[in-house]
Image (cartoon, rainbow, N blue to C red):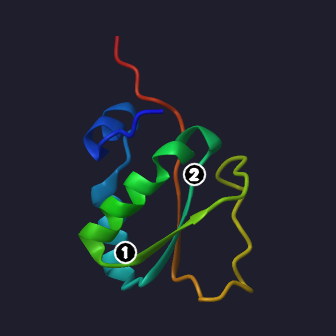
């Protein structure tokens, strides 16, 4: 698969990066876990790099399965401690 730019990914999915950046800054999160559905995992590194560049936080990508918004990873025993979890959906934007 060809590597897409953040702009190309944002044209397919409404990433709401401004909201994500604002939340990270408000919570002063230093370690952020990003959870993606399987369909978005090929773009996860590009998205993580963009978030890191805009916030300075360390982004970690959950490699396990994600079966929807109620499927929150158990991070209680993870080291380092996670400050914030951000979940992404996979519905593409379609305009008629």
Q: Is residue 31 above or below residue 93?
A: below
State the image quarter where residue 8 is shown.
Answer: top left
Residue 3: x and y in percent read 39, 40
User: Quick one: SS at disc 1?
Assistant: helix
Residue named by callout 2: 36
For the point 31% across and 67% down, the residue is 21
What is the quadrant of residue 75 in the picture?
A: bottom right
Which residue is at 30% across, 78% downward? Answer: 56
Task: Looking at the picture, tell me which residue is in the foreground, 63 or 77.
Answer: 63
Q: Identify the residue at the far top of this view.
A: 96
Q: Nearer the viewer, mark 1 or mark 2?
A: 2
Q: Is residue 85 left or right of residue 68?
A: left
Classify mark 1: residues with Cα within 10 Å, few (<14), some (14-19) or many (20+).
many
Q: Position of residue 7 (x, y in %)?
A: 26, 41
Q: What separation in Å lies between label 1 and label 2 (alpha carbons)?
A: 17 Å
Position above or below: 70 against 23? above
Q: Which residue is mark 1?
A: 24
Residue 80, x across and y down, in percent: 59, 89
Mark number for residue 49? none
Q: In the shown orientation, is residue 31 left or right of residue 82?
A: left
In this rendered view, identify the residue nearer to me: 64 or 67.
64
């Amino acid at each position: 698969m060809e590597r897409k730019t953040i702009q190309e990914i944002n044209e397919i999915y409404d990433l709401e990066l401004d909201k994500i950046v604002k939340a990270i800054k408000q919570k002063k999160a230093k370690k952020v876990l990003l959870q993606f559905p399987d369909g978005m995992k090929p773009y996860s590194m590009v998205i993580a790099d963009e978030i890191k560049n805009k916030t300075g936080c360390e982004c970690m990508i959950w490699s396990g399965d994600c079966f929807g918004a109620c499927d929150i990873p158990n991070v209680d025993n993870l080291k380092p401690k996670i400050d914030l979890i951000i979940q992404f959906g996979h519905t593409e934007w379609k305009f008629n």
